[in-house]
Image (cartoon, rainbow, N blue to C red):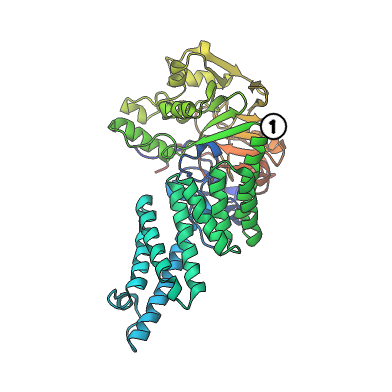
Amino acid sequence: MGQFSFARLKIPALSTKLNPSGKTSTASSAASTASSNAGGESLRTDDTPSTHSLAVPDDASVTTSRPSTATDRPPSRKSINLWSSAVFSDRRASKSFMRRRISMQSSHSQPGANHSVRSSVDTTRMPSEAQIYHLTLQANTAFEKEHYQEAIAAYTQALGLIEETMAHRDDLAAVEDLSCMLHSNRSMAYFMRQQLHDSLRDAEKVVQTRPSWSKGHFRKGEALLALGLFELAVMHYTRASELEPHNQELKRFAQKARYLLEDKQQGLAIYQLLPGRDIAHTKGLNLVQNKIFEFAQKMMNCVYLIVDRESKQCAVVDACWDVPGILRIVKKENLTLVAAIVTHYHFDHVGGVPPPPFDALHIRVSGLDTVLKRLPHVKAYIHEKDIPYLTESNPSLSLDRVTSTRDNFEMTLGTRTSLRFIHTPGHSEGSQCLLVNERRLFTGDTLFPTSCGRVDLAGGCKHAMQHSLQHILRNLDSEVMVYPGHNYGGLWSTIGYEKQYGMLRDTHSTEWGEATDPLSTT
């Protein structure tokens, strides 16, 4: 299947740029720098391997000094937390270091010898240096291919050789630098395999050896965060930010950790589920299902579980693509699903029969109807104006299980978690956002980090979208955290950030351009 996006709007007056995923983002340089996070990304929340309970963002690879994102391509598992993707910077640094060391050894043993890497890695003359060099390259190559166990094995061998020769070296500082980089890389490889305690151990080694290196504290922070040790995670993310005061992305990671700590203190947990990471894995024997899951991964949807920690009650937001996978997570976490909330009617958020041209494939996408059939006690919540569209793609859906919502409709989970529905038309007539405890906003396809939903599909309206953004969402508190419906440009943001860099900036309706062809993406 080709890629098809439901989130694309071109607004030339806002200096926008369109990426291949089909959504529009503002081209502000400040915005692109500050929004380059994880997970993803957006938070690293970027592609954390099944650390869905943290809802942490994800984005892309980075440099040692400042992280950056690659928002114009679907994120891979190795982009799990954007700054942590600095493994590639470590690769370049370790490669450069090993080349220098091997070349120096070669020149001492063979005066006048060619100092190229090819001639300097003669294992008969310099076995330890050459082996470390090649093991490091092997490990980094395996990591880039997402062969994390292979990468761990190669990093471990290289570190073993370094340890064996450490006592005989006269350049301990340089060797310790290399050792720290390899421990940092191995920490991330462990992290990708959910071996969180191993990841934490390697990160602690880096912090102990080089306490002034920000990346060690970052690695430790991400492992602690995934383990649910939010207070300690905040401390190490903050320390990493202090060591690189000009790195805005590190500040955002520290901010994210503080938000998660606040959630815990308020008895709230948010699970951010991504196709290909947490659900919709293409490893089954059903070829048709695998194709659907491949498409799900290209669509980059975000499915959410909003959990009241005390009662263990939860609501799922935009259950789609892999309902059995979602329900397995609910069961694994000992949760009780009581509500299925819909931000808007599009098939990539509710499932059912896909629109043309995909309806010709005669497939059905697992979604809301599947949830209601499997769990008879669960009720669905969707804005009244989107219900007619919902029944078109899900004709067998039982409407007596559906509660129609209006602006400011409220419900509760347990005793501490309040949910308020905010009608935000534009992407569809009945598009709605969900405000949890007045602090966490689930925006569906209305608002993305530095962009907004497209307005050229059935029920869409650019004037309604402009009003929803400028006169509804813009009025929310700047500290409200934003969870979007797709990983387009990041997995999280804040209202304040979007007021400064995104589509909540103060703009006039004349700055909005014309809608674009809904099927012109590739």
Residue in view at x 37 percent, y 68 percent: 133
- Residue identifier under label 1: 438
- Identify which residue, 428 or 474, lies in the foreground: 474
Task: Check the image and name the residue furthest to the bottom.
Answer: 111
For image coordinates 30% across by 31% down, the residue present is 288
Where's residue 413, x and y in %? 62, 23
Nearest to the observer: residue 418 or residue 485:
418
Residue at x 57% of width, y 54% of height: 218
Q: Amino acid at mark 1?
A: Glu
Q: Please tell me which residue is depicted at 58% across the width and 17% down the height of the picture.
A: 404
Question: At which x and y percent is residue 272?
Answer: 52, 36
Is any atom of residue 432 visible in this view?
no
Q: Residues within 10 Å of mark 1 (few under 14, many from 20)?
A: some
Is any atom of residue 351 visible in this view? Answer: yes
How many numbered dots are placed on residues in this image?
Answer: 1
Which secondary structure, mark 1?
loop
Image location (x, y in percent) of residue 54: 55, 39
Q: Is residue 145 above or below residue 456?
A: below
Where the N terminus falls, by quadrant? top left
